[in-house]
Image (cartoon, helix red, strand yellow):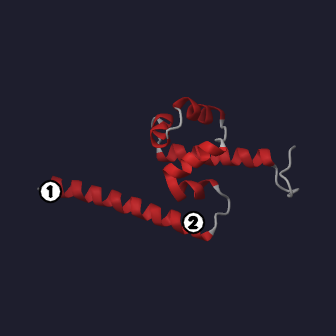
Amino acid sequence: MKQSPGNDTTVVGDERTVVAEKTMEFLRRVHPQKTADNVSADTGIAVSTIGRWLDRGSAPTSWAFLRLISAYGPEFAVAVMDHPPAWLDRAAREEESRRLRAQIAALQSRLDGAAT
């Protein structure tokens, strides 16, 4: 097994598998339907590439990983890390809170429209 440099206890292949699993779990949670199509629309990554990740459980390349972070922000970064730093965890919670408030506002607007 290939070891990461400077750390005899960390196995690179196992880490890559964990990152791949967490990445696919996040993407499927965000887009439960037509995952590859929707992720492609969000990131500009080819549908075929995302389909391979989903089918094979492959981890994204560094370039693709940066595109995912750019599209999904701190929530994605925290979702794939074992021990995110406090500042990143805080940013992810703030982003989730903003997203949920926007969803609540949209639902309230629909509810208000239905009541009139």
The residue positioned 48% from the left and 47% from the top of the image is 30
The residue positioned 64% from the left and 67% from the top of the image is 85
Disc 1 or disc 2, which is closer to the eye?
A: 2
Of residues 26 and 41, the one nearer the viewer is 41
- The disc, 1 or 2, on the residue closer to the chain's N-terminal end is 2
Three-letter amino acid code at the position of disc 2: Asp
The residue positioned 25% from the left and 59% from the top of the image is 108
Q: Which residue is mark 1?
A: 115
Three-letter amino acid code at the position of disc 1: Ala
> Is residue 23 placed above or below 74 in the rendered structure?
above
Q: Residue furthest top?
A: 48
> Is residue 21 placed above or below 83 in the rendered structure?
above
Q: Residue furthest left?
A: 116
> Is residue 85 placed above or below 8 in the rendered structure?
below
Q: Is residue 48 left or right of residue 14?
A: left
Residue 101 image position (x, y, % from top left):
36, 63
Of residues 32 and 84, the one nearer the viewer is 84
Question: Which element carries disc 2, helix, strand or loop?
Answer: helix
Q: Which residue is mark 2?
A: 89
Q: Quadrant of the C terminus?
A: bottom left
The residue positioned 59% from the left and 56% from the top of the image is 77
Residue 40 image position (x, y, % from top left):
49, 37
Question: Which element carries disc 1, helix, strand or loop?
Answer: helix
